[in-house]
Image: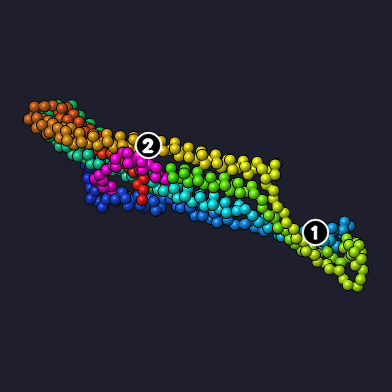
């Protein structure tokens, strides 16, 4: 094995072992808080709440009045406004008489609970993603530490085997096998480092900062404690995704009421002022018809007032309001059915998360109490036997691998337990 190869392996091991001391570990809660503060999806969900308030305000307002100008009775051979035609300045205003705007405003205001539940759902998803990437980085750090320890022990065996080889007591094949194992461990360390960088990059993306920003992971995971399953299953009802479906159903019911209200009459008021210039044929004819031939000048200006009432319940227009009402009522039923389906899916996910955490806890107990101590004693015995030439190098290396695999299984079980607890935390919402 070359000196440069040993140097690179030693540098990787030293860097890994020095990582926790380089800087204080960043608590998971602080990273979650940062992600919730800076993530664009959170801000977008907050904007949706404000938009719902604005729409409710807009729905309560009357339609804007219409103002226009109209030229009538222009002379064909000289159609010049103001001079020889009648000019009308008109204004119209639609007035809801039976609470149409209030019903629509209520329907729009019901969008706020939907947006609030959506915000909380987004926050919980981001929290879970941060936890997943944090745990992936934690596993990479612990695996790198284990890899560094394996390299250190294998290097010690290599030195001993080299001395024995020079004394003619160890076969060259044994020496080559140790060097092959060192090469495998060095390559494994490089692969794990790459995987850690990917996890940290994804975590930094959630934190809205450069992917290569350093993140120090705590060496120990917080203890995973789960509430009783039955209480956790009952708490699923408070999940924001389910509350969102209920709020959407309520909004649909209010939309149905608004559609019904739109099927009631509305009043249109119209008013205006008209001007007809002196000498206009129709004006003169009108003057002569009423005998207004005295010296007093007839008025050039006139007022126009009027009102119209919509009749939405008439046969050919009744289906619009009734159809929209039925459509919104059906939409509400659909929302409730979808919510019921989501609840069933969440209960299944909760069972899977509990099973995942409980299996991991059982594995952790077995590995810590029985398998790991036994393999550690076995490895120590193999090292003593190898030093006394009572066992082969292959047996010693196999013992090291068995212990490494068991320790890796322990790390994986710890991560599985934490992931199961994180999933339970995403599904279970404790009512305030």
The answer to whether residue 172 is seen in the rendering is no
Q: Residue at x 31, y 41 (%)?
A: 421
Q: Which mark is residue 335?
A: none
Q: Is residue 252 visible?
A: yes
Q: Are marks 2 and 1 in contact (CB under 8 Å)?
A: no
- Of badges 2 and 1, nearer the viewer stands 2
Element under disc 2:
helix
Label 2: which residue? 347
Q: For label 1, count other residues whose C-alpha is less than 10 Å away and answer few (under 14), some (14-19) or many (20+).
A: some
- Magenta stretch, residue numbers: 216-241
Please give the name of the residue rendered at 70% of the width and 42% of the height, measured from the top-left corner. 315
Q: Nearer the viewer, residue 279 or 321?
A: 321
Magenta includes 166?
Answer: no
> Where does residue 57 sit, x and y in percent of width and height?
55, 56
Residue 82 or 380: which is nearer the viewer? 82
Q: Left or right: 257 with respect to 164?
A: right
Q: Is 139 displayed left or right of 45 in the figure?
A: left
In the rendered structure, find residue 71 and report the number of the disc placed on it. 1
Q: Residue at x 70, y 52 (%)?
A: 309
Which color mode does the image show?
Answer: rainbow
Q: Quadrant of residue 185?
A: top left
Q: Earlier in the sequence, mark 2 or mark 1?
A: 1
């Amino acid at each position: 094995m070359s000196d440069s190869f040993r140097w690179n392996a030693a540098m990787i091991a030293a860097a890994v072992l020095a990582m926790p001391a380089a800087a204080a570990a960043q608590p998971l809660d602080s990273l979650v808080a940062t992600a919730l503060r800076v993530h664009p999806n959170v801000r977008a969900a907050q904007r949706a709440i404000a938009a719902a308030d604005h729409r409710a305000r807009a729905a309560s307002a009357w339609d804007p009045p219409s103002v226009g100008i109209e030229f009538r009775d222009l002379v064909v051979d000289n159609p010049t406004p103001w001079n020889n035609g009648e000019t009308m300045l008109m204004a119209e205003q639609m007035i809801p008489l039976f609470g149409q705007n209030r019903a629509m405003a209520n329907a729009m205001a019901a969008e706020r609970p939907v947006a609030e539940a959506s915000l909380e759902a987004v926050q919980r998803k981001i929290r879970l993603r941060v936890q997943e990437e944090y745990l992936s980085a934690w596993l990479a750090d612990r695996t790198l530490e284990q890899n560094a320890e394996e390299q250190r022990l294998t290097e010690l065996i290599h030195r001993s085997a080299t001395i024995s080889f020079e004394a003619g007591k160890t076969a060259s094949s044994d020496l080559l096998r140790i060097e092959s194992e060192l090469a495998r461990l060095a390559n494994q360390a490089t692969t794990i480092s790459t995987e850690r960088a990917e996890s940290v990059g994804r975590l930094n993306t959630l934190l809205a900062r450069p992917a290569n920003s350093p993140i120090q992971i705590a060496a120990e995971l917080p203890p995973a404690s789960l509430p009783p399953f039955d209480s956790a299953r009952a708490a699923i009802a408070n999940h924001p995704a389910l509350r969102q479906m209920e709020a959407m159903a309520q909004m649909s019911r209010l939309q149905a009421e608004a559609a019904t209200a739109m099927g009631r009459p509305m009043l249109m008021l119209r008013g205006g002022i008209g001007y007809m210039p002196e000498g206009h044929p129709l004006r003169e004819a009108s003057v002569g018809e009423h005998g207004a031939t005295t010296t007093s000048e007839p008025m050039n200006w006139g007022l126009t007032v009027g009102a119209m009432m919509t009749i939405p319940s008439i046969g050919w227009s009744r289906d619009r309001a009734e159809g929209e009402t039925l459509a919104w009522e059906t939409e509400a039923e659909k929302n409730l059915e979808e919510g019921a389906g989501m609840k069933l899916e969440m209960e299944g996910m909760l069972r899977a998360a509990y099973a995942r955490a409980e299996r991991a806890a059982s594995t952790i107990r077995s590995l810590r109490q029985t398998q790991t101590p036994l393999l550690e004693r076995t490895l120590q015995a193999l090292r003593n036997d190898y030093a006394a030439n009572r066992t082969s190098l292959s047996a010693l290396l196999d013992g090291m691998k068995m212990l490494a695999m068991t320790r890796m299984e322990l790390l994986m079980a710890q991560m599985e337990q934490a992931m199961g607890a994180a999933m339970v935390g995403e599904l279970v919402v404790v009512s305030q």
